[in-house]
């Protein structure tokens, strides 16, 4: 019996400890920021008594009373429920958490202005942990509760629910930039946005080629490529190889599908180091990118005049805090999908205000606007569906299928949905370098509250070109996914 | 006299699957509830019959079949295996090649379910026999590590075998559960779409649920029967004292091989069912985590018994959903008012400035509710094993003993 | 008198191939040193308490995060000891991180493992798995979005030999030295009174208790040392040239050390070190020499340790240095 009591005590102590640990760092003081409610509910506007607050606001859709609307799942007379399939505890947990924060801020802002079609928009978030089974489980649970999915994280996971989406006539915005979403064979229910990985690779390699030729007198001659296992690495490497062919670069190392999660990238490091390439194009996550760069840096074959690049998610401002910050800042040039923090575009001020109101503690990163952009697209689709008087799941889908474009107010290239894949696909890429000086000057990473007060703030990325399209990408005939495994 | 649980007057009575009337009645009631569950009219259990919960239960039943297999190997024969996910994967990919559709460089023969489902079990069992000689040489923890190696090596092979598996992080479609005679368009029994059965309109979830319930019962009864045979007793003698068993004439190696083969057969069947239920899976799904889930099921259920294994399966597979529902409810009470609002308010912080221990935001100060779900899952497993190291079955024994001695229990 | 040109070319090629081999070995040894530290901590805990610690990787990641927290985030104790050189302050911070993680190991043992003494061993293993979920989730939350660089005491310095064809990062040299020092310290520790008590408990728990050894103290000590070793490995694996810093993947590093544990023999300290080095060198060599063999598949070097483990177990079912279990009826 004594032992039994000891066990109870043990468990109690632990529970208290854990709970204390959770609450440990949330003493943010009593700011007067408005109270945004929660994962399951973003209805809160400036006041907390949200659900009753459906009174008229400036731009409620005119002449439409809720009762005329055709609805089935996820839409009531005063709410619209949108699902998010988000990786919040898996490998991209932190990043996707920010994107979700962007979505929450957007819908809180929309709700404060009266919502969509006179209805408040609520989010139903499911944590997929970047696990395919869990993703499918989340889809099946939410499909009977939501009108559409505000995002679906990850290429393999989105592919896994794609057949179901088609069968159930449900729309989902892919949170991945795989080129297949623009391919009508694959992406009928998936409104893509921003430039896909393969065209991004063409733009960024074209940019590097031109810059190299201009600054060094002669063009670069060789390239080494490597990428993650799966669509993400495959798509990007496919674009890089196409660009290399057009530019006449010799591929001295091809590490397509060679980077495996959870393993030391020994073979890729060796391949790049011994190739002695002028340009190194690696597509993976920022942790592995750092491991590969530092591995090559510590090898006999390292070249301090080579240019390092890769798809956007391969880089992170965390690189600026490392031993090799100087080195990688001098050598890296890469692509990105949306306008950076502080960009001088029409949509930025509204986004900044909404995010500040939601949570000034959010770190300044250039991924914050991704969630906002996704939500803008979904709002446009929902409004089109409401205008058709059909807010059913199928009605929302068909509203998307007859949509031409969405004005993203400069936060990302406007998506096109009306034409052929070749007309639809986005070809504009943001070209980025690492901003070591600016980052050091502001004393490291800032949160958006501090950034709003500071004169200038950087996430650590310097946007050197906005909406850049290289002739290779311009001339590229896009009819189907660049890469299908 | 007849009601004393440990008194047997014949060998038949001792060996019976359900020796007492109370057990027979309990099982009958349980089965009855299970069958009518999807009709959603049992008071208090209506929520469990909804399609999204049936989805969870279907998954649990598929895992249950696999766990019954691991229970033969670990619970009966005493060989702890962390390699179960590898055999589950083998079953899944056998189903994919035999029942799946070719294209995009993938192999697929479009054969009907009555071929690919048994074949999935057989292929896994054959591979089980092939790898078992390595495993039989080592014992205890070394065995656990050998089988752990199997999962990592298997994952690599699955990733590399793109024509079969679709390749790493891409995966492929698996055949649906529809029953067909051959390759005709119209299926004999359509499980993957809504439609009537004997005049009753049923959803696809309900039909799949009933189909798997029947399968699970078949596998559970088979396993229970196995424990009553010569083979089952041989397994248990090896588990309890292998050298003594050998001295008594139980062929150790042969029986261990058999245990591996049987357990792999179950795993293969479970893999084929799981993959075809989920629809698309990637090679990385058949990983260490899946193996660990299986071993946790067997240990939490209480190794060695069929009932314990099934309890364990439902505990482990429904726990994440239950935890999620509980925390969702808490965050609703934090904002929605009601008698327990103070509790929700105390526990949940819904933004900067609001007091609370857990954040409902996806990012920001404190742990998010999603992280809390994972932590609670871990803590519940810890707590469970600390209080009841013998598993759910141990709890059952305690309850039974309490009533056996009632009213003279201390 | 120089020989014919082809002979010279041949000689140069031979020499270059040899230097490449040396470079591979050097890289493999520094990787192996990290595996050895992980394996050693794992074996210590297993030997003393018979517990398979699935939370070892999570503890390593906590160690890495603590190093970030002390050395970078809080600059403690560096901000109070400005007169000391930066590298020394970094080492103090790292030691503090190791200490805090060791205390965490102690706490875990008291709370979760002690109440389980005498219960089925695999139940305890599943408990450590639950601990892994909890620790990893909290640590992931603390780490946040991006990897956390943990400081730069040695920068990106690289020493090179053999006309630049053999290179080794200064941090790698430090890693190897750290491993050698820690392993020697533990070998010496086993000769002290407490160390002997520990070995006695590992050998026979009941008899040693009858001799007046406190098994509880020995268990606690094993977890403290094990966690400290894991934290050290977690810190070393988060530094140049292995990556950006401590991130969500750091917790999985321990799985890669499992084959090392088994190759050496589960209950052998010498085995853990030898196993770690073998695995490190084999993985590195496979990455360098087998990457062009495409039919082996991408990431083949990652499963070489596991294949090696299977081969070793086929020949020696108790690993290279493990004690053969004597079985009686």
Image (tube, coloured by chain):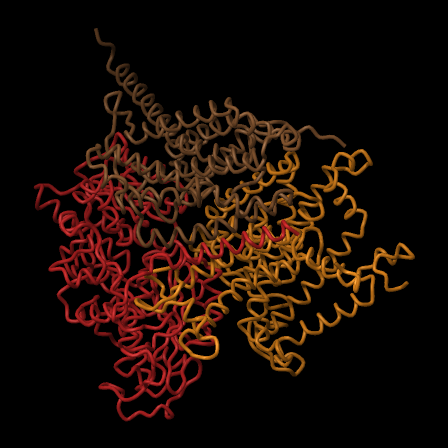
Chain colours: A red, B orange, C brown
Q: Can residue A100 be seen from the camera position used here? A: yes
User: Does C274 appear above or below B322?
Assistant: above
User: Does B192 appear above or below B109?
Assistant: below
Task: Give how far across and how far down residue C165 sits, in percent.
Answer: 27, 25
Residue drawn at 70 percent across, 64 percent down: B217
Quadrant location of the C terminus of chain C in the rendered image: top right
**B188 to the left or right of A371:** right
Task: Give how far across and how far down residue C154 sits, in percent.
Answer: 25, 32
Foreground of the two, A422 or C149: C149
Q: Can residue C304 be seen from the camera position used here? A: no
User: Does B58 appear above or below C265?
Assistant: below
Toward the top, the furthest residue is: C1
Quadrant of res B35: bottom right
Residue drawn at 89 percent across, 54 percent down: B11
Quadrant of res C327: top right
Quadrant location of the N terminus of chain C in the rendered image: top left
User: Does B259 appear above or below B223?
Assistant: above
Task: Give how far across and how far down residue A131 sits, in percent.
Answer: 45, 57
Task: Give how far across and how far down residue B301 sits, in percent.
Answer: 65, 56
**C295 to the left or right of A287:** right
**A434 to the left or right of B118:** left
């Amino acid at each position: 019996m004594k032992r039994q009591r000891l066990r109870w005590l043990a468990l109690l102590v632990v529970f208290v400890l854990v709970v204390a640990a959770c609450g440990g760092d949330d003493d943010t003081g009593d700011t007067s920021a408005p109270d945004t409610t929660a994962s399951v509910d973003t209805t809160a506007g400036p006041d907390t008594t949200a659900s009753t607050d459906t009174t008229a606001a400036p731009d409620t859709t005119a002449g439409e009373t809720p009762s005329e609307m055709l609805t089935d799942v996820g839409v009531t007379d005063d709410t619209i429920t949108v699902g998010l399939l988000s990786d919040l505890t898996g490998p991209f947990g932190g990043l996707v958490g920010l994107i979700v924060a962007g979505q929450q801020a957007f819908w809180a802002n929309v709700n404060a202005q009266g919502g969509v079609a006179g209805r408040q928009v609520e989010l139903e978030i499911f944590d997929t942990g970047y696990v395919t089974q869990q993703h499918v489980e989340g889809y099946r649970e939410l499909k009977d509760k939501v009108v559409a999915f505000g995002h679906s994280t990850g290429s393999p996971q989105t592919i896994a629910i794609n057949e179901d989406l088609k069968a159930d006539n449900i729309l989902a915005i892919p949170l991945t930039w795989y080129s297949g979403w623009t391919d009508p064979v694959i992406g009928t229910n998936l409104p893509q946005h921003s430039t896909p990985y393969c065209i991004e690779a063409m733009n960024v390699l074209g940019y590097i080629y031109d810059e190299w030729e201009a600054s060094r007198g002669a063009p670069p001659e060789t390239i080494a490529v490597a990428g993650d296992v799966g669509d993400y690495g495959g798509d990007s490497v496919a674009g890089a190889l196409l660009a290399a062919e057009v530019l006449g670069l010799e591929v001295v190392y091809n590490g397509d599908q060679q980077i495996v999660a959870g393993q030391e990238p020994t073979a890729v490091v060796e391949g790049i180091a011994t190739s002695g390439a002028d340009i190194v194009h690696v597509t993976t996550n920022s942790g592995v990118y750092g491991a590969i760069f530092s591995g090559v840096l510590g090898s006999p074959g390292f070249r301090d005049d080579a240019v390092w690049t890769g798809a956007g998610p391969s880089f992170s401002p965390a690189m600026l805090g490392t031993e090799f910050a100087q080195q990688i800042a001098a050598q890296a040039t890469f692509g990105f999908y949306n306008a950076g923090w502080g960009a001088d575009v029409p949509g930025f001020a509204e986004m900044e205000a909404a995010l500040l109101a939601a949570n000034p503690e959010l770190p300044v990163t250039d991924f914050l606007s991704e969630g906002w952009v996704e939500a803008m697209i979904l709002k446009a689709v929902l409004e089109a569906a409401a205008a058709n008087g059909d807010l059913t799941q199928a009605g929302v889908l068909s509203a998307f299928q007859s949509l031409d474009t969405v004005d993203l107010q400069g936060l990302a290239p406007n998506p096109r949905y009306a034409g052929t894949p070749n007309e639809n696909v986005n070809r504009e890429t943001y070209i980025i370098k690492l901003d070591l000086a600016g980052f050091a000057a502001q004393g490291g990473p800032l949160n958006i509250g501090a950034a709003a007060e500071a004169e200038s703030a950087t996430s650590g990325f310097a946007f050197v070109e906005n909406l850049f399209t290289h002739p290779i990408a311009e001339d590229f005939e896009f009819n189907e996914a660049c890469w299908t495994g | 006299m007849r009601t004393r649980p440990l008194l047997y007057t014949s060998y038949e009575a001792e060996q019976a699957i359900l020796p007492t009337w109370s057990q027979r009645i309990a099982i009958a009631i349980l089965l009855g509830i299970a069958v009518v569950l999807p009709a959603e009219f049992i008071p208090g259990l209506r929520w469990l019959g909804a399609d999204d919960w049936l989805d969870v239960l279907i998954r649990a039943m598929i895992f249950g079949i696999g766990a019954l297999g691991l229970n033969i190997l670990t619970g009966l024969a005493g060989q702890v295996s962390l390699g179960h996910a590898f055999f589950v994967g083998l079953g899944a990919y056998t189903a994919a090649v035999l029942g799946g559709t070719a294209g995009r460089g993938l192999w697929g023969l479009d054969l009907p379910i009555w071929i690919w489902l048994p074949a999935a079990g057989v292929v896994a069992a054959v591979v089980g026999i092939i790898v078992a000689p390595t495993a039989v040489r080592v014992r205890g923890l070394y065995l656990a590590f050998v089988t752990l190696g199997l999962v990592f090596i298997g994952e690599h092979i699955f990733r590399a075998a793109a024509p079969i598996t679709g390749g790493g992080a891409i995966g492929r479609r698996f055949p649906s559960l529809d029953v067909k005679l051959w390759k005709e368009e119209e299926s004999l029994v359509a499980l993957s779409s809504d439609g009537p059965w004997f005049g009753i309109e049923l959803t696809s979830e309900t039909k799949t649920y009933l189909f798997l319930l029947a399968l699970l019962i078949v596998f559970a009864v088979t396993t229970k029967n196995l424990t009553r045979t010569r083979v089952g007793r041989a397994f248990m003698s090896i588990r309890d004292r292998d050298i003594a068993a050998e001295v008594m004439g139980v062929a150790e190696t042969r029986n261990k091989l058999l245990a591996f083969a049987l357990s792999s057969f179950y795993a293969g069947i479970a893999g084929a069912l799981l993959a075809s239920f989920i629809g698309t899976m990637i090679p990385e799904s058949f990983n260490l985590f899946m193996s660990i889930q299986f071993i946790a099921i067997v240990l939490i259920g209480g190794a060695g018994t069929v009932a314990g294994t099934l309890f364990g399966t439902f505990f482990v597979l429904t726990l994440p959903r239950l935890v999620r529902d509980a925390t969702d409810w808490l965050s609703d009470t934090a904002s929605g008012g009601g008698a327990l609002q103070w509790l929700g308010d105390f526990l949940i912080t819904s933004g900067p400035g609001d007091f609370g221990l857990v954040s409902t935001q996806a990012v920001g100060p404190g742990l998010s509710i999603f992280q809390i779900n994972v932590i609670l899952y871990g803590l519940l497993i810890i707590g469970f094993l600390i209080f009841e190291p013998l598993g759910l079955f141990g709890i059952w024994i305690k309850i039974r003993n309490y009533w056996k001695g009632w009213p003279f229990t201390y | 008198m120089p020989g014919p040109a082809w002979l010279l070319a041949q000689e140069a090629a031979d020499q270059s191939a040899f230097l490449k081999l040396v470079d591979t070995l050097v890289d493999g040894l520094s990787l192996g040193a990290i595996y050895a530290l992980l394996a050693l901590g794992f074996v210590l805990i297993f030997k003393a308490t018979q517990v398979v610690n699935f939370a070892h990787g999570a503890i390593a990641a906590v160690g890495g995060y603590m190093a970030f927290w002390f050395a970078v985030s809080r600059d403690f104790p560096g901000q109070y000891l400005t007169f000391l050189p930066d590298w020394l302050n970094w080492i103090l911070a790292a030691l503090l991180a190791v200490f805090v993680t060791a205390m965490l190991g102690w706490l875990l043992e008291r709370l979760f493992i002690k109440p389980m003494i005498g219960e089925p061993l695999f139940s305890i293993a599943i408990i450590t798995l639950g601990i892994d979920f909890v620790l990893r989730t909290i640590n992931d939350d603390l780490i946040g979005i991006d990897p956390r660089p943990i400081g730069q005491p040695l920068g990106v310095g690289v020493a090179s030999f053999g006309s630049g064809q053999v290179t080794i990062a200064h941090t790698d040299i430090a890693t190897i030295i750290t491993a050698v020092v820690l392993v020697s310290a533990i070998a010496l520790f086993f000769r002290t009174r407490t160390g002997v008590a520990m070995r006695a408990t590992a050998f026979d728990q009941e008899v040693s208790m009858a001799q007046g050894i406190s098994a509880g103290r020995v268990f606690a000590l094993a977890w403290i040392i094990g966690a400290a070793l894991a934290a050290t490995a977690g810190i070393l694996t988060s530094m140049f040239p292995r990556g950006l810093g401590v991130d969500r993947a750091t917790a999985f590093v321990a799985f890669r050390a499992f084959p090392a544990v088994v190759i050496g023999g589960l209950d052998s300290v010498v085995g853990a070190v030898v196993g770690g080095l073998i695995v490190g060198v084999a993985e590195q060599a496979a990455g360098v020499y087998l990457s062009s063999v495409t039919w082996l598949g991408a990431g083949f070097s990652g499963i070489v340790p596991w294949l090696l483990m299977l081969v070793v177990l086929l020949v020696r079912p108790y690993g290279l240095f493990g004690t053969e279990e004597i079985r009686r009826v």
